[in-house]
C-alpha cells in the first residue's frame, strides 16, 4: 500500500514537473516570437515540411475513412430504413469528428516523431548549442517556426482529409447504389450550417499547437545520445496523441456549448 | 573592489595592450572572476579567475571532467555560472538578457568539440548561417565570403558537400570557418584536435596559428593535446579540482615541481 502511494506521489510529481517545464518552454517560445527577426524563410520551409509532405498520408487516410464509413453505415441505416440519411451520416461524421481527429493523430505520428527526433538529434550533437552560440535564438528559429507551421497546416490538412473522405464516401456509395455527386453533397449538407463546418476544422489549429509544442519541447530537452533521441521521438508521438484526444473531448464540449 | 578597478588591475596583470579598433575597449578581451559552477552536488568550477588579453591565446588543460568545456560554455553564455563575473571587453555578460547576450555572441566564434555542423545544411549553408542572420550581405557577397573562409581553411571546392560526407578533420575545418564568419574578436576552441590523427592535428594547429596571426583574435583553446597546447597557446592554465592550479608558459609548467603538474606533463616527455 505504502509503495503504491509512493509510486503515485512520484508519478504525480514528475507529471507536475513536466507540466511546469512545458509552461516555461512555452513562455520562452512566446517571448522569442515577438522579437525580430521573424525567420520567415524557415517558417516557409517548415510549412512545406509539415504541410506538403503530410498531404499524401492525410489524403489516403481521409479516403479510407470515407470508404469505410460508406460501407459500414449503409448496412446499419438500411436495417433501420434510413438509407436516405447515408450521405448526411458520411459528410457529418467526417466533417465533425473523424476528419479532424484522424488528421490530428496522423500528424502527431508523422510530424511529432519527425520534430522530436530531428530536434533531439540536434540537441545531442550540440547543433542547438551552435545555433545559440552564433547569436540566433533557437526557441524562435527551431521551435516557434515549427509550432506556427503546425497551427497553420492542421486545418488545411483537415480540409484535405474531409475532401477525400467525402469524395471516396460518395464513390463507395455510388458503386452500390448510383447517386450523382451533386445530390450526394446536397443531401449530405442538408440541415448543416457554416458553423458546423468551421468550428470543427478550426479546432485542429489547437491540435497543431499541441503537436508542435510537445514535439519541440520533447526534442529540445533530449539527453543521452541516440537512445535519448529515440525516446524523444516516441514520447513526442505518445504525448501529443494523448493530448490531442484529450483536447478533442474538451473542444467538442466547447463547440457544442458555444457554436450549436 | 569596484569592478572597474578590478578590470584595470586585471589588464595590468595580463599586460593587455590598448585596442584601437572600433567597438573594443582597452580592457582585456576576457576576464573571469570567482566563477563557480555546480551540477547538483558535483562542484565543477570552484572560483576560477582567468584573464585573456586581446591577441593572446590561452590554452586550458586539465583532466577529463574538470570543467574545461563548461568554462567555454559559460563564456559564450550557453550556461550561467552559479556565481562570479565574466567580462567581455569590459562588459559584464552574466546578467544580460538574451538580445544583449546575442550581440556579444556575434563578437565570438565557437568551435565545438565535434564541430556541431548543421547536418541538414550544406557546407556553404553552414558557413553562411551567421552571415545571413547578422549581416546585410547580399547572396553573392555571402557566397564570396564563404569561399574566402573555405580557402582560408584549405577546403575550396567543397561548398555543396553535406557534413556527413566530410571526415572528422574536414568537419573541424568547416566548423572553424563558420566560427570565423563574423570576424570574431574572441575565438573559443573546444578540443580542436580531439579524435584526429597526428598529421591532421598538426594541420589544424598550423591553421589555427595562421588564422590567429591573420585575425589578431583572443583565443581560448581547451585541449587534452599537450603538443597542440604547446604549439598554439601563448599561455597555459591547468585546471585541477575546480581551480586554476597553475598558469604560465609551457616552460613555467614544466619547471613548477608540482606533483600533479609533473604527472600531467609526463605523457608529453
Image: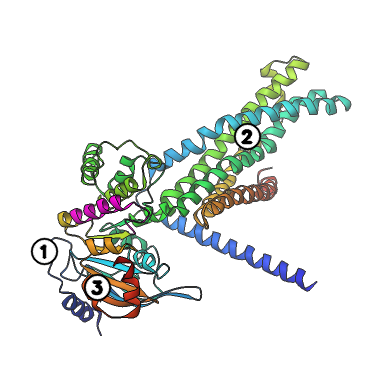
Mark 1 lies on a secondary structure that is loop
Q: Residue at x 27, y 62 (%)?
A: B227
The residue that disc 3 covers is B51
Chain holding disc 1:
B
Q: Are marks 1 and 3 on the same chain?
A: yes
Q: Quadrant of the N terminus of chain B?
A: bottom left
Q: Earlier in the sequence, mark 1 or mark 3?
A: 1
Tell me the CA gap for discs 2 and 1: 69 Å
Quadrant housing residue A129:
bottom left
Apparent side of residue B114 relative to residue B142 in the rendered image (left or right): right
Kindly report the secondary structure that dominates the magenta region of the rendered protein.
Answer: helix
Residue B20, numbered label: 1
The region drawn magenta spans B191-211
Q: Label 3 vs label 2: CA separation?
A: 69 Å
Location of residue B18 in the rendering, given as x and y in whole percent from the top left corner: 12, 69
**Residue located beneath label 2 in the image:** A194
Q: At numbered mark 3, what does the secondary structure look like: helix, strand or loop?
A: strand
Choose top left, top right, bottom left or bottom right for residue B90: bottom left
How many numbered marks does the figure carry? 3
Q: Nearer the viewer, mark 3 or mark 2?
A: 3
Q: Say if residue B183 shows up in the picture.
A: no
Amino acid at each position: 500500500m505504502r509503495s503504491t502511494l509512493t509510486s503515485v506521489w512520484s508519478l504525480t510529481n514528475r507529471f507536475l514537473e513536466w507540466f511546469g517545464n512545458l509552461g516555461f518552454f512555452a513562455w520562452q517560445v512566446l517571448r522569442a516570437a515577438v522579437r525580430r527577426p521573424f525567420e520567415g524563410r524557415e517558417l516557409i520551409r517548415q510549412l512545406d515540411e509539415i504541410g506538403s509532405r503530410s498531404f499524401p498520408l492525410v489524403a489516403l487516410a481521409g479516403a479510407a475513412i470515407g470508404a469505410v464509413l460508406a460501407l459500414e453505415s449503409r448496412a446499419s441505416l438500411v436495417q433501420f430504413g434510413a438509407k436516405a440519411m447515408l450521405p448526411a451520416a458520411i459528410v457529418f461524421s467526417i466533417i465533425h469528428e473523424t476528419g479532424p481527429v484522424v488528421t490530428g493523430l496522423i500528424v502527431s505520428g508523422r510530424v511529432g516523431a519527425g520534430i522530436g527526433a530531428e530536434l533531439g538529434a540536434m540537441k545531442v550533437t550540440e547543433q542547438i548549442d551552435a545555433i545559440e552560440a552564433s547569436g540566433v535564438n533557437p526557441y524562435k528559429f527551431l521551435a516557434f517556426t515549427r509550432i506556427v507551421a503546425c497551427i497553420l497546416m492542421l486545418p488545411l490538412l483537415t480540409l484535405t482529409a474531409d475532401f477525400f473522405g467525402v469524395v471516396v464516401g460518395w464513390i463507395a456509395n455510388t458503386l452500390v447504389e448510383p447517386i450523382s455527386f451533386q445530390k450526394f453533397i446536397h443531401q449530405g449538407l442538408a440541415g448543416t450550417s457554416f458553423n458546423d463546418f468551421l468550428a470543427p476544422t478550426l479546432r485542429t489549429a489547437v491540435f497543431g499547437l499541441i503537436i508542435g509544442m510537445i514535439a519541440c519541447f520533447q526534442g529540445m530537452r533530449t539527453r543521452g545520445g541516440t537512445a535519448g533521441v529515440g525516446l524523444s521521438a516516441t514520447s513526442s508521438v505518445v504525448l501529443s496523441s494523448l493530448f490531442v484526444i484529450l483536447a478533442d473531448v474538451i473542444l467538442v464540449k466547447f463547440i457544442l456549448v458555444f457554436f450549436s | 573592489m569596484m569592478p572597474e578597478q578590478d578590470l584595470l588591475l586585471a589588464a595590468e596583470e595580463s599586460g593587455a595592450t590598448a585596442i584601437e579598433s572600433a567597438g573594443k575597449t582597452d580592457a582585456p578581451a576576457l576576464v573571469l572572476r570567482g566563477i563557480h559552477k555546480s551540477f547538483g552536488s558535483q562542484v565543477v568550477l570552484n572560483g576560477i579567475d582567468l584573464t585573456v588579453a586581446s591577441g593572446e591565446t590561452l590554452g586550458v588543460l586539465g583532466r577529463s571532467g574538470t570543467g574545461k568545456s563548461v568554462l567555454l560554455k559559460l563564456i559564450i553564455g550557453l550556461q550561467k555560472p552559479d556565481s562570479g563575473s565574466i567580462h567581455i571587453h569590459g562588459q559584464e555578460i552574466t546578467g544580460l538578457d538574451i538580445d544583449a547576450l546575442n550581440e556579444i555572441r556575434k563578437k565570438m566564434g565557437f568551435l565545438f568539440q565535434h564541430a556541431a555542423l548543421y547536418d541538414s545544411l550544406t557546407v556553404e549553408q553552414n558557413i553562411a548561417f551567421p552571415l545571413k542572420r547578422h549581416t546585410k550581405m547580399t547572396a553573392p557577397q555571402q557566397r564570396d565570403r564563404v569561399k574566402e573562409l573555405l580557402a582560408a581553411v584549405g577546403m575550396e571546392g567543397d561548398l555543396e558537400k553535406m557534413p556527413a560526407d566530410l571526415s572528422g578533420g574536414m568537419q573541424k575545418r568547416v566548423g572553424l570557418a563558420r566560427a570565423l564568419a563574423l570576424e570574431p574578436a574572441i575565438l573559443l576552441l573546444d578540443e580542436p584536435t580531439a579524435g584526429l590523427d597526428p598529421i591532421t592535428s598538426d594541420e589544424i594547429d598550423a591553421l589555427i596559428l595562421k588564422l590567429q596571426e591573420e585575425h589578431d583574435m583572443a583565443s581560448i583553446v581547451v585541449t587534452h593535446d599537450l603538443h597542440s597546447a604547446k604549439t598554439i597557446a601563448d599561455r597555459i592554465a591547468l585546471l585541477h579540482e575546480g581551480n586554476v592550479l597553475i598558469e604560465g608558459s609551457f616552460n613555467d609548467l614544466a619547471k613548477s615541481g608540482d606533483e600533479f603538474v609533473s604527472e600531467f606533463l609526463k605523457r608529453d616527455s
